[in-house]
Amino acid sequence: MSGALYETISVPVDGGDLVVGVWGPPQAPVVLAPHGITGNHLHMAFLARHLPDLRVVAPDLRGRGGSALLPGPWGMVNHARDLVAILDHLGVDQAPVVGHSMGAFVAVQVAAEHPERVPRIVLIDGGLALQVPAGVDVDAMIEAVIGPAMQRLRTTFGSVDSYRDFWKQHPAFANDWSDIVQAAVDYDLVGDPGELHSSVSLDAVRADGGDALVDDRVKTALARTRCPIHLLWAERGMLDQEPGLYVDEMIAPFRDLLGERFTDERVAGVNHYTIGLSDRGAARVAAAIGC
């Protein structure tokens, strides 16, 4: 799929086993790569293709994919704990963490809670607090931020083809449908014929979305980190619209907060999805990892 060695492994965590995708040579340096809020480990397959000499280790975060049945509690602290369990299971002392969207918030939390395990983090269109107006209902804000993804989680599909069609019509993939994207879409689909649905837990999305959208909590975690942080932000958003999730004036306060150890770059020609789920996006992310 990615041009690299690939397997899935099971890692014991609180409540059961976490399913983890692993690409690359067994003895190669490890990069941890958590996915977005409704994604799965196959969203990191493009990145693995561009890092053939590294071991890209991407979990299905609890509540998603092969880890869908793992119980809560969810939230960034618990996902961070699961990532440390992966490092322990692999016998790895430390590894850079590159996270996409919600996975970027997980990366920040791991670096804040376990600084000795994380030499640097790369944030892919996520990880910095979004501007949520005071008093806004969290469910409403999650709906506004991730759009059709919430609708997808509530919908049943009659066939694999109908689920693929849902994604093929998504504006983000109008020009970027690929075998890798299709594999990730197919992997997400579970259930009985005629009543297929996404593996992603709505409860997990609500808990994680609420956690990631709490501005003060996110800023506190960022301030507690000690490692270098690099942000790549897409010029276009989840529906391939302009502007994207981040604009320069939103990032400026974090440059002041984090100082010289924070760097960022705007990635043109990609949206929130294709910054990771395309060769051109993944190539920029791979270059930023710097291993």
Image (tube, rainbow, N blue to C red):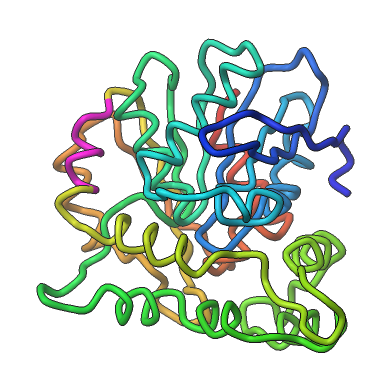
Q: Main secondary structure of the magenta part?
A: helix
277 part of magenta stretch: no
Which region is colored magenta? 218-225
- Of residues 145 and 67, the one nearer the viewer is 67
Q: Position of residue 257 (x, y in %)?
A: 15, 40
Q: Residue 46 at x, y = what percent? A: 74, 50
Name the residue located 84 percent from the left edge and 35 percent from the top edge. 7
Q: Residue at x 47, y 74 (%)?
A: 237
State left or right for residue 144 relative to residue 66: left
Q: Nearer the viewer, residue 107 or 289?
A: 107
Q: Residue 89 occupies which quadrant of the picture?
A: top right
Residue 76 image offset from top left, x and y in percent: 37, 45
Outermost residue, left side: 134
Number of residue marks: 0
In magenta stretch: residue 220: yes
Q: Residue at x 48, y 73 (%)?
A: 236
Left or right placement of residue 273 versus residue 163 in this view: left
Quadrant holding the C terminus: top right
Residue in view at x 51 percent, y 50 percent: 71
The part of the image, by quadrant, that contains residue 243 is: bottom left
Location of residue 193 with respect to 3 vertically, above or below: below
Q: Is residue 277 left or right of residue 273?
A: right
| Image quadrant where residue 205 sits | bottom left
**Vertical side of 93 occupied by 253: above or below:** below
